[in-house]
Amino acid sequence: MPAPFLGVAVVGSGGRTAAVDAYGDVVDLRVPGPAGQAIVAVRAAPQSAGTVASGEAVIARARFGSTSELPFWRADSVRQHYLPGTNVLRTVARFGGRRAVVVRRIGGPGAVRADRRWLAQARPLGAGAPRWARAMYRRSLLVLRALTDRRSGAVAAGARDGWAYVWPRDASAVAMAFAAAGYKTDARSIADFLGRLDLKAAARFHGTGAPVTGRAAQGDARGWVTAAALATWGTQRPKPGLAWRRQADYQEGDAGDYLGNAIASAAAISPQFETPRGLVREADEPGSGLDSSAAWAVRPFARPALFPLVRQTLLRIAAGGARFGIVPSENWKGGNDPWTAPTAWTAWSLAAQGERRVALRLMAKLRRAATPLGLLPERVDAGTGLPVSTTPLAWSHAFAILALRELWPHRADPP
């Protein structure tokens, strides 16, 4: 079991949003929406270190008769599940022969009906989609419902300190996923929110639209926001672009001339990114390694001239993946723990290129990386598959939805 106070589940339906740990404790609670003000917020660093004081969370406790209250992490066993088709979480703890239950929901008794009514509006996957795919699809949609402010369209990357902000690329992927699943109103709300941001001001934003200091604007932001508008409104609504050169990319490290930024910005991909093995991350740096962001040149930024090189690049990356997925790029400096978003977007791209077998293998890795609740962490331990970062991550679930729809399109899907 994960340590107490490390969030493993999200509760809510686009209003107040809570993160809950494996023992039913509320470790993050935000209002008025998922990227709003923190009422409870266990800091990310102590979460990861397992050094959180109990007073920082809303703790699930049991009392039997006149005995003192016992936190659920003292139980002999703990099990969790979502009520089917909802974001209502039930945690059951057993102390010897006795049982205690806590149900975490936001929205009162009507939350179950509201979630199920919303989920029933989704465009289904196409014929032949297996049970696991339908389950991943439904849970991913519910995760995005919880992390998207239903009033403003602000999408939080995750329900956690440091992640409860709006990143343009993450939110844009969520808008595309909602549009593909038939939730046009939700998608347009996100696209409208993104269209009001000053993308030159920062890499991430509060739920109010105000920039968050500390990280400079990134070179792919305008491209992603434009793609979201195209997917939701059918028009690109172009605005002045941002420079992609000498900017940070999705890996959020040092500034440079990066492949993902060039693709998102519709820049000409020069031979500077091309090597005999495929497309590398940094221009004029063949040693920078193949980059999974090459996938974006197929979906969502269609660059047909690059398709052969993209296929070559992604097949090599997929072949080197571990049991639970891939890392963002070769020569990745963040260790060997797999990341779920690159695994999902690589599957999406390869499925679109007819590499169905490889795409399905990547989706199998994604399933292994998912928690027992069906939630996708940002990344997982390469050896155990346990979450080592924010769980769930909106971006990962958005790409999972898009990959599933590419693998099992519905007859009513647009071409």
Image: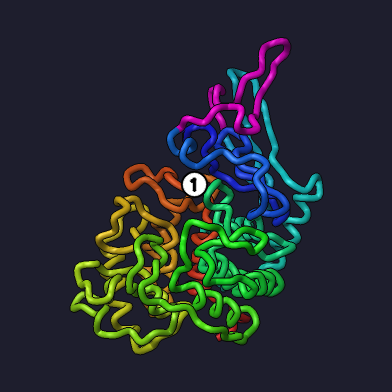
Q: Quadrant of the C terminus?
A: bottom right
**Image x and y of residue 211, in percent:** 58, 62
- Left or right position of 70 against 364: right
Q: Is residue 181 visible?
A: no
Comparing 385 with 282, the one in front is 282
Question: Vertical placement of 266 versus 20: above or below?
Answer: below
Which amino acid does the dot numbered 1 rest on?
Answer: Thr
Q: Can you name the residue that lies furthest to the bottom here?
A: 305
- Left or right position of 37 against 275: right
101 inside magenta stretch: no
Tell me the magenta residue range: 50-78
Q: Which residue is mark 1?
A: 371
Q: Residue at x 53, y 84 (%)?
A: 240
> Quadrant of the rendered structure where residue 268 is?
bottom left
62 inside magenta stretch: yes
- Left or right position of 344 against 292: right
Q: Residue at x 69, y 54 (%)?
A: 33
Question: Vertical placement of 147 versus 69: above or below?
Answer: below
Question: Vertical placement of 233 versus 154: above or below?
Answer: below
Q: Residue at x 21, y 75 (%)?
A: 277
